């Protein structure tokens, strides 16, 4: 009788171990899936927050933004951009290697966003970088622009100049 | 199983560069002109801000695809991969690049995508999946910069699968001057060590790998690694001299030094060079932390060696010393385990991570300066599986930070709306716009009347309108005098020419002066009027803008309350959910560390037991000898 009990106990123990092992594995896989699901939800929430931020902080009537882009520029690597709006330094940005590559691959960086009253304004962009030979280059571009009762977007554009070994720098107004 | 892990460790070490999420982008499509949202999404994606890239990508998708087609899906999958959401990303990626339509993806881009996907799986340790993807790479379409790396990875994966023929084909195809040739040779040598291959052939492959290591980015580190692997292999196969030759070549400040010194000592011991063997072990013992497992082995190896050198009293002392040291090490490990429970181990490590860097491609900062678990952590982190779990925990930690930050931001938004409403009400209460409007209307009225007066004043080009009272009297007097002269002429037929001349002269002087003043004054007044007009226009514009702002101001705070509250409650709910998952993952990581500490403690106890037994045996031997010598002396 004892032998039967012991056999049954061993069987039960074996079964319990098997079940708990498979449950453990399932839990681990479940946890990974849960983490991934959480990440997706956080990203979705961030998008909602981004929308709200755009609507609340920068209403369409007063919103003003400055973008930075590079167009087919292989012989210049931007290091920093400093913006001055109406005689006041408003922002500056130091670029990492990845960010330069991102610009080179067609990305557009929103370097400055704010609200601006209607009227005539002046934007100065100071661009520093390194050319193909490793020489430091510094250029200042200025734009006088008018702002009406609608959003205004400007772009600091670094363009390839096929006639020169240096790129062109300009501030372009988005229509 | 252990062999598999070692193999995994070796193969993973051989990869000198890691894959980045954006490498998986099969197409370098430039941002469409002036499409800020798409351009920003692309910028975030390439600069490694994957969560922002996903948000922007989703915003582009919601707005409408605008002809971007499947590119948005590729971007989404890439960003997901970057955030460590491997499952959904992999599914999406495979679906995308399996589509064989050339119009969708050119062969070059497809080959590159398969290659990077395979490399991603490879670095994650999912080698079977990696091999499947790697076999889909069309080598002829692959970028020439990637060809050697492709052959290296393919060879490694084929070796892992056990398909030597395919592996050999790939190894032969690697350019000998490429850095990948050395890594491929090393992997081949490791593969040979696990098979029944003649030892001379294995040695030749190791030598070849050493020769090619000069072409790599870190030739010294790779040479050290090759020497260590070769040394360990030759030591294990009983080729002591070959092992010594390789182990002696490992640098003294390399990451492989402890293991090399330990094996070097054992190899010398096998060659009966006991005196020489003591040197590397003492060096290892003094220069490295006791938490290093090689040092722990040395602690017991030294007295064994002393015993072999017949320095039994010294050996006895060294065994006692080792026993004490094992106690200390055991306690240190115990303290680590306690710190793990009290939140002084993993938590400081997490708190020093950069809050914006998370996901599969963001490395964990393991520096942990001035922390007692620094050495242990460095040791345990060399294991890939632990790194993966710790990364997940770090991601959850960063997500928690982000959720809290977002809640703070929502509170700030709430304050903004309240402030805006208050400001609006203040302006409304003070009737500023209305008052200013009235004031401006008054100014306009005054301006009009002023203009009328000025118009009157300048009506006569002779400038009479600008004459002073005295001048006006003079002009009237001139008229009177002219009338008197006329009367004189009519009544008395007297014509006083000299009076007429004098009158004209005086009148001429005054009129000249008046006409001069007229043009000067007109110019000045015109300028002042124009300036005033401009000022009034500017003020009117400003007032119009203020009126407009006043009208639209309620839009800047109305209706946001509900959105903010709703979003905040969503964030709070998410935070609660995250806390639960965080605790589970924390337990998992803690469990791994605890089990590892326990294993280390068991090993230390095992060493200690061996040391105690050996010390007891040695004590018996030495004391019996003393006794027998003493007995002998008595007998004499």
Image: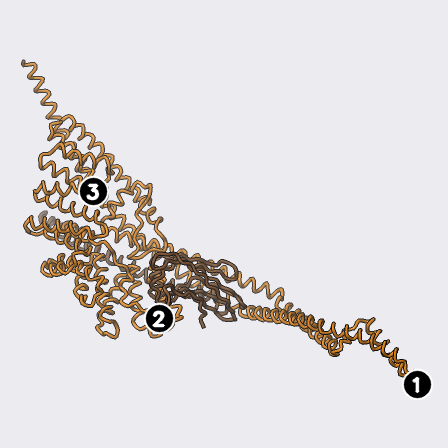
Q: Nearer the viewer, residue B262 or B124?
A: B262
- Using the image, tell me which numbered label, if any, was put on residue B251: 3
Quadrant in the picture for residue B172 = bottom left
Q: Nearer the viewer, residue B1 or B247?
A: B247
Q: Is residue B173 rendered to the left or right of residue A175?
A: left
Marks 3/1: CA–CA distance: 139 Å
Q: Is residue B457 rendered to the left or right of residue B342?
A: right
Circles 3 and 2: CB distance less than 8 Å?
Answer: no
Marks 3/2: CA–CA distance: 55 Å
The residue sitting at the front extreme is B498
Q: Are marks 3 and 1 on the same chain?
A: yes
- Identified at 31% across, 42% down, the residue is B339
Residue B429, given in percent of the width and then of the height, sits at: 61, 65
Q: Nearer the viewer, residue B211 or B169?
A: B211
- Using the image, tell me which numbered label, if any, was put on residue B493: 1
The chain letter under disc 3 is B
Q: Earlier in the sequence, mark 3 or mark 2?
A: 2
Q: Are marks 2 and 1 on the same chain?
A: yes
Q: Is residue A49 above or below residue B194?
A: below
Circles 3 and 1: CB distance less than 8 Å?
Answer: no
Circles 2 and 1: CB distance less than 8 Å?
Answer: no
- Using the image, tell me which numbered label, if any, was put on residue B61: 2
């Amino acid at each position: 009788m004892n032998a039967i009990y012991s056999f049954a106990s061993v069987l039960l123990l074996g079964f319990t171990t098997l079940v708990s092992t498979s449950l453990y594995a399932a839990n681990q896989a479940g946890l990974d899936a849960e983490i991934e699901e959480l990440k997706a939800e956080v990203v979705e929430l961030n998008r909602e927050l981004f929308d709200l931020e755009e609507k609340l902080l920068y209403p369409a009537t007063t919103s003003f933004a400055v973008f930075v882009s590079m167009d087919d520029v292989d012989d210049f690597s931007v290091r920093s951009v400093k913006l001055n709006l109406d005689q006041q330094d408003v922002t500056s940005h130091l670029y990492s290697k990845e960010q330069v590559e991102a610009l080179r691959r067609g990305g557009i960086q929103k370097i400055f966003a704010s609200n601006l009253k209607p009227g005539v304004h002046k934007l100065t962009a100071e661009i520093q970088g390194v050319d193909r030979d490793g020489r430091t280059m510094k250029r200042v571009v200025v734009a006088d622009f008018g702002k009406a009762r609608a959003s205004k977007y400007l772009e600091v554009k670094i363009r390839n100049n096929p006639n020169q070994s240096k790129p062109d720098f300009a501030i372009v107004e988005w229509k | 199983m252990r062999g598999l892990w070692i193999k995994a460790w070796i193969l993973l070490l051989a990869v000198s560069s890691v894959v980045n999420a954006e490498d998986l982008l099969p197409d370098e499509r430039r941002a469409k002109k002036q499409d800020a949202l798409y351009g920003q999404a692309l910028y975030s994606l390439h600069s490694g801000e994957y969560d922002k890239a996903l948000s922007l990508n989703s915003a582009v998708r919601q707005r409408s695809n605008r002809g971007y087609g499947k590119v948005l899906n590729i971007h989404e999958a890439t960003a997901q991969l970057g955030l460590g959401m491997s499952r959904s990303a992999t599914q999406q990626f495979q679906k995308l690049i399996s589509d064989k339509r050339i119009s969708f993806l050119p062969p070059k881009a497809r080959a590159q995508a398969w290659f990077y996907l395979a490399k991603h799986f490879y670095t994650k340790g999912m080698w079977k999946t990696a091999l499947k993807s790697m076999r889909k790479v069309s080598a002829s379409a692959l970028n020439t910069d990637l060809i050697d790396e492709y052959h290296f990875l393919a060879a490694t994966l084929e070796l892992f699968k056990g398909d030597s023929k395919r592996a050999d084909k790939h190894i032969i195809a690697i350019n000998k001057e490429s850095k990948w040739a050395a890594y491929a040779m090393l992997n081949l040598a490791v593969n040979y060590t696990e098979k029944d291959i003649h030892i001379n052939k294995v040695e030749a492959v190791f030598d070849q790998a050493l020769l090619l290591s000069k072409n790599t980015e870190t030739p010294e580190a790779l040479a050290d690694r090759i020497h260590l692997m070769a040394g360990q292999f030759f030591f294990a196969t009983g080729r002591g001299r070959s092992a010594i030759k390789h182990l002696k070549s490992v640098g003294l400040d390399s990451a492989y030094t402890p293991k090399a010194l330990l094996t070097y000592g054992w190899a010398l011991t096998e060659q009966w060079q006991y005196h020489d063997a003591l040197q590397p072990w003492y060096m290892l013992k003094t220069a490295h932390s006791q938490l290093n497992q090689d040092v722990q082995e040395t602690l017991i190896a030294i007295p064994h060696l002393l015993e072999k050198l017949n320095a039994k009293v010294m050996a006895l002392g060294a065994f006692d010393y080792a026993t004490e040291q094992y106690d200390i090490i055991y306690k240190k490990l115990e303290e680590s385990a306690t710190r793990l429970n009290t939140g002084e181990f993993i938590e400081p490590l997490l708190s020093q991570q950069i809050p914006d860097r998370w996901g599969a491609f963001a490395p964990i900062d393991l520096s942990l300066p001035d922390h007692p678990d620094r050495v242990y952590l460095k040791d345990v982190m060399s294991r890939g599986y632990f790194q993966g779990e710790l990364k997940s925990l770090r991601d959850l930690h960063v997500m928690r930070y982000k959720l809290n930050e977002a809640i703070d931001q929502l509170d700030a938004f709430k304050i903004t709306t309240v402030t805006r409403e208050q400001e609006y009400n203040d302006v409304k209460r003070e009737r500023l716009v209305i008052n200013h409007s009235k004031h401006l209307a008054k100014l306009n009225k005054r301006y009009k009347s002023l203009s009328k007066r000025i118009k009157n004043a300048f009506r006569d080009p002779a400038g009479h309108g600008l004459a002073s009272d005295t001048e006006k009297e003079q002009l009237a007097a001139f008229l009177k005098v002219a009338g008197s002269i006329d009367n004189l002429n009519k009544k008395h037929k007297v014509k006083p020419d000299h009076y007429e001349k004098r009158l004209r002269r005086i009148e001429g002087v005054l009129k000249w002066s008046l006409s001069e003043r007229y043009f000067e004054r007109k110019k000045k007044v015109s300028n002042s009027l124009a300036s005033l007009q401009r000022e009034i226009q500017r003020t009117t514009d400003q007032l119009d803008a203020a009126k407009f702002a006043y009208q639209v101001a309620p839009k800047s705070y109305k209706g946001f309350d509900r959105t903010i509250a709703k979003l905040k409650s969503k964030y709070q709910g998410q935070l609660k959910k995250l806390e639960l998952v965080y605790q589970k993952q924390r337990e998992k990581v803690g469990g791994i560390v605890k089990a590892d500490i326990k294993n280390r403690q068991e090993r230390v106890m095992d060493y200690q037991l061996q040391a105690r037994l050996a010390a007891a045996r040695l004590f018996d031997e030495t004391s019996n000898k003393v006794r027998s010598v003493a007995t002998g002396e008595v007998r004499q």
